[in-house]
C-alpha cells in the first residue's frame, strides 16, 4: 500500500475522560496531554482518525444527535488547543440490543472504511486506546498497537496485555511520542 500513516484513536478514556455514555457536551473534558499529542500528530501529517463504540445509542442512553453534539464540542476544545481530528467513525450498535455487526470494535468495519476513505496504510499506522479492543485491530491490519493504562482500562485488559506482550503507555502523549519517534524523520523544508 502507498497510503499515508494514521493514528486510529479511541475517544472515551483516551482523548476525553470516560464519563460513561456522555450525552451532554458540557461533560466533555479533555484528558491531560491529549490535545498536545494530537497536535504533534497533525504537525507530522499523520491523519487522526477517531474510532469509537457508542453502544449507549443502541441502549437508548443517548441519541445520534447527542453523539454529534459531543463530537462537535470535542472538536471545539481541540481547536482551541491547536489540534484537530481528521475524521470520526462511530458504531452505535450493541450485540445484545441490535445484534452483531462488523463495525463494533474490535471488529474491522470502521477501520476498513477509514482506510479506504482516507488512503491510509494501516501497516504504517498507530492503533491506540484504553482497552484492548482499541489495540487488537493492529494485529489484523499490520499496524502498531499501544494500550494506554487509564482509569477506564479493565484489569483483565491490563493482565492480558502483560501476558501477551502488548505494548503499553501511561498516556496518549507517551504513546504518540513513541510512535512518532519510530517514524523516519521528516525531510527538512527550505
Image (cartoon, helix red, strand yellow):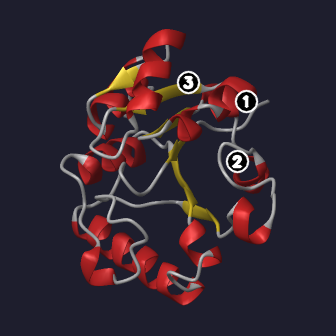
Residue drawn at 71 percent across, 63 percent down: 96
Which callout, 2 or 1, points at the residue further toward the start of the chain?
2
Residue 161 vertical placement versus 16 (above, below) = above
Q: To which residue does mark 1 refer?
A: 141
Q: Quadrant of the N terminus?
A: top right
Please rate how many residues cluster around mark 2, counting C-alpha atoms within 10 Å: few if below 14, some from 14 to 19, many from 20.
many
Give me the C-alpha separation between circle 2 and circle 3: 14 Å
Mark 3 or mark 2, which is nearer the start of the sequence? 2
Q: Secondary structure at mark 3?
A: strand
Which residue bears the numbered disc 3? 144
Query: Is 108 or 101 nearer to us in this picture?
Result: 101
Q: Residues within 10 Å of mark 1 (few under 14, many from 20)?
A: some
Q: How many numbered dots are placed on residues in this image?
A: 3
Q: Are marks 2 and 1 in contact (CB under 8 Å)?
A: yes
| Distance from Cα at disc 1 to Cα at disc 3 | 9 Å
Examine the rendering and report whether any part of residue 6 can be seen: no
Residue in the picture at 28% in, 49% down: 34
Residue of label 2 = 111
Q: Residue 64's spot in the image, x, y percent?
A: 58, 84
Q: Where is residue 105 drawn, in percent x and y?
A: 65, 48
Q: Picture coordinates of residue 155 (x, y %)?
A: 38, 31
Q: CA distance from mark 2 to mark 1?
A: 9 Å
Amino acid at each position: 500500500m502507498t497510503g499515508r500513516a494514521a493514528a486510529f484513536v479511541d475517544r472515551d478514556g483516551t482523548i476525553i475522560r470516560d464519563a460513561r455514555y456522555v450525552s451532554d457536551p458540557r461533560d466533555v473534558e479533555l484528558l491531560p496531554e491529549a490535545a498536545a499529542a494530537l497536535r504533534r500528530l497533525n504537525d507530522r501529517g499523520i491523519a487522526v482518525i477517531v474510532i469509537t463504540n457508542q453502544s449507549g445509542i443502541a441502549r437508548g442512553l443517548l441519541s445520534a444527535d447527542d453523539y454529534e453534539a459531543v463530537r462537535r464540542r470535542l472538536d471545539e476544545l481541540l481547536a482551541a488547543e491547536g489540534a484537530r481530528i481528521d475524521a470520526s467513525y462511530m458504531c452505535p450498535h450493541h450485540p445484545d440490543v441490535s445484534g452483531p455487526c462488523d463495525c463494533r470494535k474490535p471488529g474491522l468495519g470502521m477501520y476498513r472504511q477509514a482506510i479506504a476513505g482516507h488512503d491510509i496504510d494501516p501497516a504504517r499506522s498507530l492503533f491506540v486506546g484504553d482497552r484492548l479492543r482499541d489495540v487488537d485491530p493492529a494485529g489484523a491490519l499490520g499496524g502498531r498497537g499501544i494500550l494506554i493504562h487509564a482509569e477506564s482500562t479493565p484489569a483483565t485488559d491490563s493482565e492480558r496485555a502483560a501476558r501477551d506482550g502488548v505494548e503499553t503507555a501511561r498516556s496518549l502523549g507517551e504513546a504518540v511520542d513513541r510512535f512518532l519517534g519510530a517514524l523516519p524523520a521528516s525531510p527538512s523544508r527550505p
